[in-house]
Image: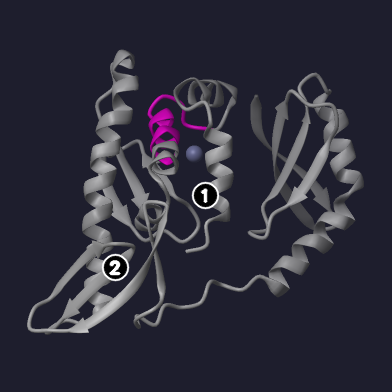
Amino acid sequence: MIATIEKIEYGKEVIEFELLQEDRKTLSIEVLPTTKIKVKAPENRNKQDIIKKVQYKAKWITKQRQYFIDNYKEPDEKRYISGECFWYLGKQYRLKIIKSNTDSVKLKKGCLIVEYNLKTPAKLINKWYKDKALYAYKKELDKCFQKFIAYNIVKPSLKIRKLTKRWGSYNKNSNTITMNIEAIKANKDCIDYVIYHELCHCLYFSHNKQFYTLLESKCKEWNKLKNKLEKLVL
Ligand SMILES: [Zn+2]
């Protein structure tokens, strides 16, 4: 499969879309609730031809996108009360809040149990996520990096942050991968996909053909995992 970023112009607007060329017979255009546009096309189809087809649908795309902008709601803000659901490594846990004489967070039998005393449940949970994320990402980075040892690159250092629009990023100057703290809510395969993606940036700066060939060789299911992440409701 080949994945590239292409664009068309519509009025004053430049519309970017992700083009996946794969083993299929028809062309499909999809506007995701995140307003990203995904175009799937047969492998041997001429790129200019595909872009022309997408151009032809520009009005529809713009309309779809506007619909999602108007109707897409941010996931409900957490209230940190017993009964709420919290994701951790691809599984949902029900929150149980207990006033106590200690501050602690633990998982037990499908529940996220928070005992609080001096700190608020919200603070305790956010700190817990951060600790868990740092631990898990470090471990997964060590594992994923094994597949990159042959390239003679230095293992990037790791940072975690709350990123709003992406799961991870790579800074070449500092050789650092920044991971979104939210990714800890997805399963390990999804976390690995984000890490593999960023590790590929150690070798290729842009999302060019070589980049995707490398990514595919390290993480065969990357596209499936990417879709899974996009659908994750936090
Ligand atoms: Zn990238």
The answer to whether residue 10 is left or right of residue 155 is right
61 part of magenta stretch: no
Q: Residue furthest left?
A: 101
| Kind of residue sitting beneath label 2 | Leu
**Amino acid beneath label 1:** Leu
Front residue (pair 219, 152): 219
Q: Magenta segment: does it hold 198?
A: yes
- Residue 32 percent coordinates (x, y): 69, 55
Residue at 34% from the left image edge and 21% from the top image edge: 147
Q: Nearer the viewer, mark 2 or mark 1?
A: 2
What colour scheme has been applied to the protein in the rendered image? one colour
Which residue is tagged 1? 229
Residue that numbered label 2 is attached to = 112
Give residue 24's quadrant in the image. top right
- In which quarter of the view is residue 61 placed? bottom right
Q: Name the spot of residue 102 as percent of width and height, x first.
A: 8, 78
Tag 1 secondary structure = helix
Residue 143 horizontal/vertical position (percent): 28, 30
In the figure, is residue 9 to the left or right of 36? right
> Are there few (<14), some (14-19), or many (20+) residues within 10 Å of tag 1?
some
